[in-house]
Image (tube, rainbow, N blue to C red):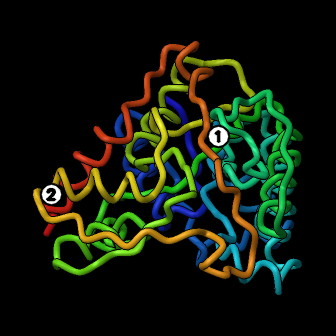
Amino acid sequence: MMRVAVVGARGQLGATIVREFSRGHGVTALDRSMLDVTDAPSVEKIIERARPDVIINCTGYNAVDAAEDHPVEAIAVNGLAVLSLARAAQSLDAALVHFGSDFVFDGSSRVPYSEEDRPSPCSVYAVSKLLGEWFAEDAPRAYVLRVESLFGGVDHAALGRGSVAAIVGGLRAGKAVKAFVDRTVSPTFVVDAARATRELLERQAAPGLYHCVNSGFCTWLEFAEEAARQLGVEPRIEPVALADARLRAARPLFCALSNRKLQTVGIEMPSWQDALARYLAARVEIS
């Protein structure tokens, strides 16, 4: 049994990680009210008190557009806070799990990015996430798991949050939903990401960088069409080009990630279509 400290335990990913690791491991769940990750002395003190074998960092400054105007805050949470956690892990000889992002790439590829591909961040948010990856390496055993387009969760609020929830909700209501026709992603069901995280640690896989996404990739338009098919509703979808959205921060157009490295350690990630079906079933079950 591992002693696991989950930082950011009330978020979409954090709450799912807590539930996943509570099955067979001792979990200390630390939410924002209990630990300010930007306060380095507090990080050291509270992590020392918990004495975990593994620290799992689920915190993040995820306001991509707002980061352009608030770079200090983004770097403090996504970068410097990770350094504090890595140093806390070092003092306890603990492992650190940190979640990265597809945004570290510029989107110029036409094949899914591997862990060996060189990052090229194009926004403040992306730079802050790349800094976090680098700082995580100060831990004696660091696992950096890149995820993207997260959806799902353990409660009604999480299941109703994000781009996927907006698409599904609109389709069910018979409304026309907008979907990017030119932005390609590897959607990630948080339940699958949490399971893969647990399996990596339980298998004592080699530390390092892993892409932790569901298998396959699609444009958001293709995702919305598949959601309509699985829901059995008319696909009332309005295609939108990313350039027309006029977003504050740059987004990579093609940011599909390859999860083959996870496969090499025996962890199979279900397809995004399978993940979508289980997400839809969970929404029906919990509603």
Query: 181 or 97, which is in the foreground?
Result: 181
Residue 3: percent from left, percent from top: 55, 39
Question: In terms of image quadrants, where is residue 146?
Answer: top right
The amino acid beneath tag 1 is: Leu
Q: Which mark is residue 145?
A: 1
From the viewer's perspective, is residue 160 above or below residue 27? below
Q: Residue at x 52, y 35 (%)?
A: 197
Residue 155: percent from left, percent from top: 29, 65
Extreme residue in the bottom direction: 69
Q: Is residue 13 left or right of residue 244?
A: left
From the viewer's perspective, is residue 244 above or below residue 220? below
Total numbered badges shown on the rendered structure: 2
Residue 157: percent from left, percent from top: 33, 74
Q: Nearer the viewer, mark 2 or mark 1?
A: 2
Quarter of the image that includes the C terminus: bottom left
Question: In terms of image quadrants, where is residue 234?
Answer: bottom left
Q: Residue at x 79, y 33 (%)?
A: 93
Query: 196 or 83, which is in the foreground?
Result: 196
Q: Is residue 195 left or right of residue 249?
A: left
Q: Which residue was labeled with disc 2? A: 231
Q: Is residue 151 left or right of residue 121?
A: left
Q: Residue at x 81, y 62 (%)?
A: 81
Residue 116: percent from left, percent from top: 79, 27
Question: In terms of image quadrants, where is residue 175?
Answer: bottom left
Sequence order check, earlier mark of 2 and 1? 1
- Disc 1 crowd rating (10 Å Cα; few below 14, some 14-19, many 20+) is many
Query: 149 or 40, which is in the foreground?
Result: 149
Are the residues tagged 2 and 1 within 8 Å (C-beta)? Answer: no
Badge 1 element: strand
